[in-house]
Image (cartoon, rainbow, N blue to C red):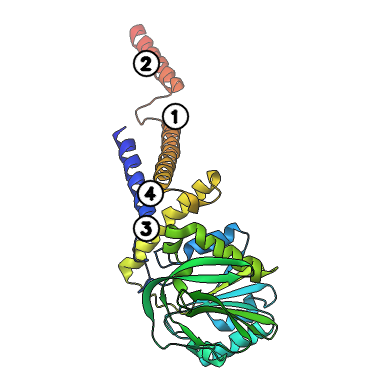
Amino acid sequence: MKRLVFLIAFLTIIMLITVYSLEFKAAIGFITDPPSIHNTGPGGFSTLVQILKFKGFKIISLNSIAELYKDCSPKSSILVIASPDKPLSYEDSQYITSWISDGGLAIVLDEIGSVDVLIDRLGIETLNYTIRDVDYAVCSFGELKLWILVNVYRPIVSIPENAKAICRLSRGTVIAIHMDIGAGKLLLFTDSSIFINYMFQKVRSRIEILLNSIESTYFGNRSIICFYEGGWINKYLSTTAILKNIVLFPYAVISWGISIVYRDLLYMTSTMKILSALFISILVTTIISIQYLVRKQFLRSRRRPETEVSKEILIGVVDRCIQLWKKRVKR
């Protein structure tokens, strides 16, 4: 009984650590806190990806821009590039421009200048420094006007004739545009933090309205969203890699178990996550304990003690002793 209680307590602690690890400020495995689909920290895109999957979109992770035509058809896909740590190369900008011209839709979010080679090629000019200041911007999608929060951005100071501003700050500064390129379109936001996990936690409803507006205005019949993930600096320390595996494996088990009851894990409160973790740990412990007890009982029933003597052998020995005794009596 003591072993069972200890096992339940141990698994519960592991599950709770896993749940709370998702709230850590620094994403495990990343040098920075980038807008990556694999980053569950405040600056990551993991919440955005879960919402897109819930909407029915297929998510593809690209490690190289050269994989664009291989994995993401321009007519059916959307390319998302969000402030990569390593700047795009001139060849990358050629690939992206060609892909958009063939009918692709690219959404580029950047405030650190890592996509400058692309926007310079398209005739878009931004300030060469980043502004860190909380402000509100008005975004226009047809008749809809939506206020969004921005905090780190690069103002756009010049756009070509085939581009149009879609988001402006209260003082008129442009921070987002859409641009026709051949048969496709480019959406440029100079603040990648618009769709990060932190924003979904603080102003989820407003960000979802923005996402739905972009979807209805630009996505059309596209069903594949390709995130460029090849630009992150993610060197792992040996202990960090081990911790990452320890954390992610039980989280996968929790997510699978909870998804049976809850369709979307993201909408669960912290209390619900804790209760779910506790429930799953007790369930797993119960199953393991039942298996252990059944196996132990089965082996016990099949094991014959070393001192055990069969009934036939015992009768034979007794009969032999009686015969020897009779012979001795006759003598």
The residue singled out by tag 2 in the image is: 321
Spatial CA distance of label 3 from label 4 is 14 Å
Going from N to C along the chain, the mark reached first, 3 or 4, is 4
Q: Between tags 2 and 4, which lies in front?
A: 4
Q: Residue at x 62, y 63 (%)?
A: 57
The residue singled out by tag 3 in the image is: 23
The residue singled out by tag 1 in the image is: 301
Q: Between tags 2 and 3, which lies in front?
A: 3
Amino acid beneath label 4: Met
Rate crowding at label 2 as few (under 14), some (14 to 19) or many (20 or more) other CA atoms within 10 Å: few
- The residue most toward the front is 171
Classify mark 4: helix, strand or loop: helix
Q: Residue at x 65, y 71 (%)?
A: 218
Q: Between tags 4 and 1, which lies in front?
A: 4
Instruction: Determine the image quadrant of residue 297.
Output: top left
Going from N to C along the chain, the mark reached first, 1 or 3, is 3
Spatial CA distance of label 1 from label 2 is 33 Å
Classify mark 1: helix, strand or loop: helix
Going from N to C along the chain, the mark reached first, 4 or 1, is 4
